[in-house]
Image (tube, rainbow, N blue to C red):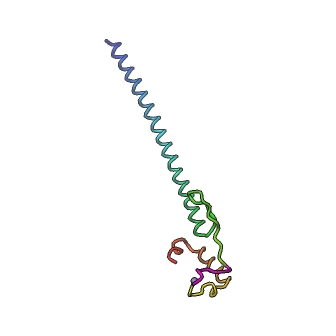
Amino acid sequence: MKTVVLETWQLLKMITHQLTWAVNRMTVRFRRRKLEKDFEGRKSQWKRNQRKYARTRGLSYVKACGQLVEEKQPILNGCICHKKCRLKCSDKFSSDERQALFDEFYALSSDVQQVQ
Ligand SMILES: [Zn+2]
């Protein structure tokens, strides 16, 4: 009788031990996956910020889809608007003024740029 009790107890002890081990392993795996997810999230967030900064400053950057966006250049010579523009913007703004407006615009923050 005594040996049966002892054997049962040892069996229970073994099962408990194995269960604890399994749970620990799962917890470690879960934590690692969460860390990897957090890292990926931060990485993509960082890339988004890089793109946003480049877009705001008129610099060249690569879109999320892989498309390259060229660096923005001011139109110093030739037409700014369509040919039939009544305000004659192309005549009114000199190259220097165009360059100054361009620099001023890309020096603004993205929020202010959107209001313009
Ligand atoms: Zn115009």
Most foreground residue, 14 or 87: 87
Looking at the rendering, which quadrant does residue 47 occupy?
bottom right
Q: Position of residue 86 (x, y in %)?
A: 56, 87
Q: Which quadrant is home to the N terminus?
A: top left
Lateral position of residue 84 relative to residue 34, left or right: right
Give the image location of residue 28, x and y in percent.
Answer: 48, 38
Q: Is residue 80 covered in magenta?
A: yes
Specify the principal SS of the magenta part. loop
Up-down relation of residue 81 to residue 26 (above or below): below
Residue at 57%, 84% in the rendered image: 85
Q: Is residue 31 above or below residue 46?
A: above
User: Which residue is nearer to you in this view: 20 or 81?
Assistant: 81
Q: Where's ligand 1: which quadrant?
A: bottom right
Q: Which residues are magenta?
A: 76-84
Residue most toward the left? 1
Residue 24 drawn at (x, y percent): 45, 35
* Residue 94 belongs to the span the image colors magenta: no
Residue at point 60%, 73% (across, down): 106
66 shown above or below 75: above
At 62% from the left and 61% from the top, the residue drawn is 68
* Residue at the (47%, 34%) spot, across then down: 25
Q: How many marks?
A: 0
Q: Nearer the viewer, residue 88 or 8?
A: 88
Residue 66 vertical placement versus 103 (above, below) = above
